Image (cartoon, rainbow, N blue to C red):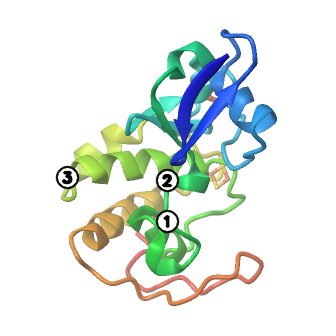
Amino acid sequence: MVEFELNGVARRVDMPADTPLLWVIRDGLGLPGTKFGCGMGLCGACTIHLDGQPIRSCAIPLAAAAGRRLTTIEGLGAGPAISDLHPAQQAWIEGSVAHCGYCESGQIMAAAALIDANDDPSDAEIDSALSGNLCRCGTYPRIRAAVRRAAELKRGGETVVQSFDPNVAIAPVGGLRA
Ligand code: FES
Ligand code: FES
């Protein structure tokens, strides 16, 4: 039995200690927002936070989570309202960053960890922090622009998106397309 905090809630998981956290999160705890890409720690699709630091959940065993704090994309914001979302999530919506969307959960988690630690990252720092998060759709220019916008929101900017329905496409906001 391994105990940890997930998205602010205490959890106890009875799975083998060497089970990758990705499997614990998706199959054991039913949170599908974290994606399986390579399963080898190479693509970043499975990025979550462990005590606020981005990790590849496919490459970290359940035992490593004991007594620690995990955050997934489902728990990144304080609530479903736009104003409660993490600045990275707000910026991703503003910029209509996703294409197929498969990599974007991991991209957002990596971006959120960066701007939580540094709300004015340079382009080099952005590229370095997200270099391990691959996007087969090539949304990198929009990702970089969204990270810059997320940092701006983190510093006190106000999002221009007031509501969001994931089933309805929104027009990209001018300036976020790099
Ligand atoms: S699925 Fe974990 S890094 Fe690719
Ligand atoms: S949006 Fe399709 S893989 Fe990144």
- Amino acid type of the residue tagged 2 in the rendering: Ile
Query: What distance separates the C-alpha of mark 3 from that of mark 1?
Result: 19 Å
Q: Where residue 37 sits in the image (x, y, percent)?
A: 70, 34
| Pointer 1 with pointer 2, Cβ within 8 A | yes
Residue under the image location 57 percent in, 22 percent down: 41
> On the image, which quarter does residue 97 sit in?
bottom right
Compared with 110, 137 (above or below) is below
Placement of the N terminus among the 4 image quadrants:
top right
Residue under the image location 55 percent in, 54 percent down: 75
Q: Where residue 106 sits in the image (x, y, percent)?
A: 56, 45
Residue under the image location 74 percent in, 11 percent down: 16
Q: Which residue lies under the disc numbered 2?
A: 108
Mark 2 vs mark 3, foreground winner is 2
Q: Nearer the viewer, residue 71 or 2?
A: 2
Q: Which residue lies under the disc numbered 1?
A: 89
Compared with 127, 123 (above or below) is below
- Amino acid type of the residue tagged 3 in the rendering: Ser
Q: Which residue lies under the disc numbered 3?
A: 122
Query: What distance separates the C-alpha of mark 2 from that of mark 3?
Result: 17 Å
